[in-house]
């Protein structure tokens, strides 16, 4: 398989390469990106443990993908619309979506946790690839409004095999839509490795559709940041759509229902642990003396407080009325849905009768 050079700004040794973008790397940028990644990792870890304690129905960890998400979302404007997949917690947190909103869907108490318009961040999409077409449609609206927004759409390597993904690439290219497709190639689609997912690297396939493409080390937050900024600026100038393929690794299972030891080796995990995105930036901060003791202590305290807030907010989420799930099936309702709601209400009531009888 022909390969393309991977763009790297912060090497695996924690040192900056001599790429020209290194001139734009400031201590403040590094501290900000480090803080985003550390806080995201804490929320992810708390959510995982809450699931294990029975407080969440399911959780899909973002562990290991923090650099890909933080680097990309911090490279766009806060007003640029984002269409996420379902593992993009670090990106969501950067958009001000707090733990309560983030966890509500996974606790099964809300159909979605946040208002997409308020955060310029779409609801999580579990139907693989569907959000890519939504993103292109939205970008066409941006064109018609005459706005200079750029739409960012996240997806995974597995999702790139969906018809929707390929339709979205083609459609975006033909209408010149202001969209950046951002693939977090985390090597696995549940138990399917990328080697069995595609025969040519995704960024090369995307080039064939007519997209501007770049392959970047997705565990290098500074490289992702620089590459996304370049791509977004070109799209904003009217250069047409782009695709970034970020090479990263899903360090946890696919979800809390998955056991990754069934299909991948401990050696593979060790290989990627040595490329941990958070450790890599920390090495640069330490090497340059850009993070003093006070900064690190404050960040520890902030992460502890956010962890405690995540646990509190999750347990405090109120249970909805069980019949509320029928509310948004069709606008204005329908006799069929009404009958189903009534039947379900009667079913629930039958348990109350049984409880009464038992007394
Ligand atoms: C249309 C569709 N087909 C199948 C699934 C089942 N499914 C859920 S996640 C997943 C793997 C997705 O892998 P990838 O896109 O690489 O994202 P990752 O989970 O690795 O972040 C599959 C097959 C689904 N949700 N939607």
Image (cartoon, helix red, strand yellow):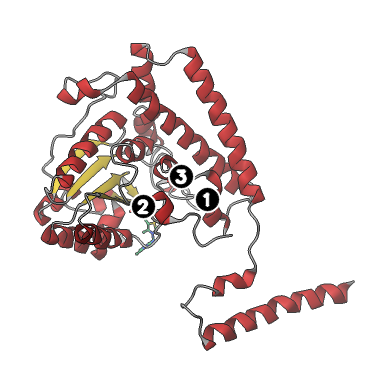
Residue 247 located left or right of residue 4? right
Mark nearest the camera among 3 and 2 is 2
Question: Dot 3: what SS?
Answer: loop
Q: Is residue 162 visible?
A: no
Q: Is residue 288 visible?
A: yes
- Residue 326, given in percent of the width and then of the height, sits at 55, 75
Asked if marks 3 and 2 touch (Cβ < 8 Å), the reply is: no
Asked if marks 2 and 1 touch (Cβ < 8 Å), the reply is: no
Question: Dot 2: what SS?
Answer: loop
What residue is rendered at 65% in x and 48% in y?
A: 315
The image shows residue 75, relative to residue 284, as above or below, that is below
What residue does disc 1 label? 101
Mark nearest the camera among 3 and 1 is 1
- Residue 81, given in percent of the width and then of the height, sits at 32, 51
What residue is rendered at 21% in x and 43% in y?
A: 232
Badge 3 or badge 1: first in the primary sequence: 3
What residue does disc 3 label? 61
- Residue 357, given in percent of the width and then of the height, sits at 86, 77
- Residue 145, given in percent of the width and then of the height, sits at 23, 59
Q: Is the residue marked by circle 3 packed among few (<14), some (14-19), or many (20+) residues within 10 Å? A: many
Nearest to the observer: residue 114 or residue 186: 114
Label 3 near ligand 1 (CB < 8 Å):
no
Q: Quadrant of residue 11?
A: top left
What residue does disc 2 label? 84
Residue 196 located left or right of residue 290? left
Tell me, for residue 274, which label it has, or none.
none
């Amino acid at each position: 398989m022909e390969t393309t050079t991977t763009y790297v700004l912060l090497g695996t040794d924690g040192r900056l390469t001599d790429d020209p973008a290194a001139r734009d790397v400031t201590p403040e940028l590094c501290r900000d990106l480090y803080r985003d990644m550390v806080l995201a990792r804490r929320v992810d870890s708390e959510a995982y443990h809450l699931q294990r304690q029975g407080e969440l129905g399911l959780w899909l960890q973002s562990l290991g993908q923090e650099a890909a998400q933080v680097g990309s979302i911090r490279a766009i404007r806060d007003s640029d619309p984002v269409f996420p997949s379902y593992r993009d917690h670090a990106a969501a947190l950067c958009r001000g979506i707090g733990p309560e909103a983030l966890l509500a869907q996974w606790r099964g108490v809300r159909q979605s946790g946040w208002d997409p318009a308020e955060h310029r961040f779409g609801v999580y999409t579990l139907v693989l690839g569907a959000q890519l077409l939504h993103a292109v449609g939205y970008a066409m609206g941006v064109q018609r409004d005459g706005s200079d927004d750029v739409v960012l759409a996240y997806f995974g390597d597995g999702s790139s095999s969906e018809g929707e993904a390929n339709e979205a690439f083609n459609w975006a290219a033909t209408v010149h839509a202001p969209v950046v497709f951002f693939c977090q190639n985390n090597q696995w689609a549940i138990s399917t490795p990328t080697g069995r997912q595609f025969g040519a690297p995704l960024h090369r396939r995307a080039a064939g559709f007519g997209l501007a493409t770049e392959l970047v080390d997705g565990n290098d937050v500074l490289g992702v940041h620089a590459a996304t900024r370049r791509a977004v600026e070109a799209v904003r100038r009217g250069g047409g759509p782009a695709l970034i393929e970020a090479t990263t690794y899903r360090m946890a299972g696919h979800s809390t229902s998955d056991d990754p030891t069934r299909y991948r080796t401990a050696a593979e995990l060790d290989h990627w642990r040595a490329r941990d995105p958070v450790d890599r930036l920390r090495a640069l901060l330490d090497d340059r003396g850009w993070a003093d003791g006070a900064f690190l202590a404050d960040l520890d305290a902030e992460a502890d407080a956010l962890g405690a807030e995540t646990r509190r907010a999750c347990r405090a989420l109120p249970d909805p009325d069980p019949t509320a799930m029928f509310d948004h099936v069709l606008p204005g309702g329908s006799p069929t849905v009404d009958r189903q709601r009534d039947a379900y209400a009667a079913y629930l009531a039958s348990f109350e009768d049984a409880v009464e009888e038992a007394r």
